[in-house]
Image (cartoon, rainbow, N blue to C red):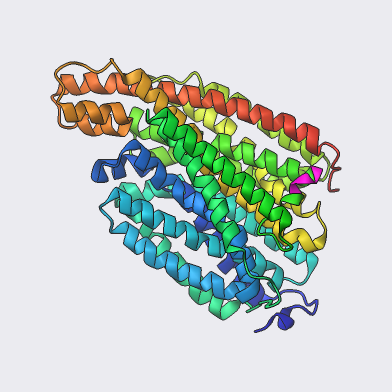
Amino acid sequence: MSSADIDDGRRAGLRQWSGLVVLVLPAMLLFMMLTILFLAIPQLAAELRPTSTQTLWIIDIYGFLMAGLLVTMGTLGDRIGHRRLLIAGAVVFAVVSLAAANTSDPALLILWRAVLGVAAATQMPATLGLIFATFADARQRGVAVGVWSGGISVGTGLGPVLGGALLDTFSWRAAFLVAVPVMVVVAIGAFLLLPDTRNPAVGRPDLFSVALSLATLLPIVYGVKELAKDGTLATALVSVVVGLGFGVWFVLRQLRLPEPLLDVRLFAHRAVGGALGVFLLAAIALGGVYLLVTQYLQLVEGLSPLQAGLWVLPGAALLVLVSTVSPILVRRVRPGYLIAAGLAVQVIGYLMLTQVGAVGGLPLLVAGFMVLYPAVAPSMALTTNLVVGSVPPQKAGAASGLATTCSDLGISLGIAIIGSIGAAVYRTRISGELPGGLPPEAVAASRDSLDGAVSAARGLPGELAAAVLAPAREAFAGGLNVAAVIAAVIAAGAAILALRQLRHIPPTG
């Protein structure tokens, strides 16, 4: 089946809508994999015993590599065919998920998560590109893109819930194994139902720009993590400066290239730069706090993974609802006002989390999460259309890639930065609070993270274990409080940016 078969203006039939299911599945799963390990961390930490820094890398290396390679893979898909790239990515994802599920070494698990991030990057641009190739009718294409966007929202929101159910029945390894049958369906379904489109005239991806983009992100994140784990200040600062230097080099190179990897000139457009900036800030604020909330439910409140997932479920359901309603509301309300209002509500939710303590904090934590999580939906649901609708048609592909990149990168940066700050607060507050008479290995584990304290307490007598857990849980709650303050400031800044940069955009109606 060639692109000519579906590019003659015909309305889509059963085959095309069945193909949409194949395209929504990876979009939902790949974003679900950003958050599915949130509830697995306590169990994974008890079995593999990673350091707190390794734990953060296990969680966010996937998102960083996925975000860093999305634009590259989109260009490669244009050249060799999106269907071909989607099938290859699905096969690699399935095989590597099996390898990750059978790993017993934290460093090796980081490697497998990195490879999964690369495989995810091959699929996300392919799904959107194939939607445009499959649906020739503009109205049907709009519905298809809306369904695709809804799949991303569902995946992001329900990742911890599904993870909790799997963990309660099996183990953390099931969080990887769940991807295998899905990717098998994607590979087979893509071959049978989707068009094989390609454009050999598209230029080759600039591999040096790809290297520069990764050389920008990874040193900065490494520097932040070094600061969080009480590493050498000079090493951390040098790492951040090196990353920023590569970032400047990357931007200058994009401005000179006739076919840049990332068209940074798009950021100069008021609506594009404003929408992407708002979405990036909102995702950063949410990413780190979301991780800490799921850890609080298990490590402080002592809930099982399934119970923790069920407490997250109301907020996730509201996120999907608000994501569905936002495109309807924006027909009558300016999108800048709607996004800013959502972010202002988010600030309230974050401020509620600043009051959560180690004892009796569950009701306030759940209430705060139910306020803040759905409030990100307007920026999540409207950003892609705002960005794509604000640029010439020939730049629509690059613009949509930027929107997806900002979402993925923002969540990963939030985990890295705000999660690291929460870990640093924990270490500061736990110092000097541990009881005497502890074995050296228990002291080291308890000072590293709450996961370590919980693991160490399992091998201690009852009273001594309680004396370890009480201050450790207090310290973790303090880290959550500080992280929530930072997230509230970021969300407030994003709301102001939305009002300044997006208020000129009229309602879609």
Q: Which residues are magenta?
A: 266-270
Q: Position of residue 138 (x, y in %)?
A: 79, 66
Q: Is residue 71 above or below residue 496?
A: below
Q: Is residue 481 left or right of residue 134?
A: left
Image quarter (top left, top right, bottom left or bottom right) of the N terminus = bottom right
On the image, which quarter does residue 279 sit in? Answer: top right
Q: Can residue 24 be seen?
A: no
Question: Magenta stretch: residue 250 in it?
Answer: no
Give above or below for 159 relative to 145. above
Q: Residue at x 44, y 64 (%)?
A: 93
Q: Left or right: 448 with respect to 240?
A: left
- Is residue 229 shown to the viewer in this render? yes
Asked if residue 297 is positioned above or below residue 162 in the image, the reply reads above
Numbered-mark total: 0
Residue at position x 63%, y 30% from top? 491
Q: Nearer the viewer, residue 495 or 13?
A: 495
Residue 354 image position (x, y, % from top left): 51, 21
Magenta run includes residue 267: yes
Location of residue 200 in the rendering, given as x and y in whole percent from the top left corner = 67, 78
- Please tell me which residue is depicted at 37% across the width and 31% down the height of the picture: 231
Q: Position of residue 175 (x, y in %)?
A: 38, 53
Overall secondary structure of the magenta stretch?
helix
Nearest the eye: 254 or 182: 254
What residue is drawn where x is 48% and y is 36%? 238
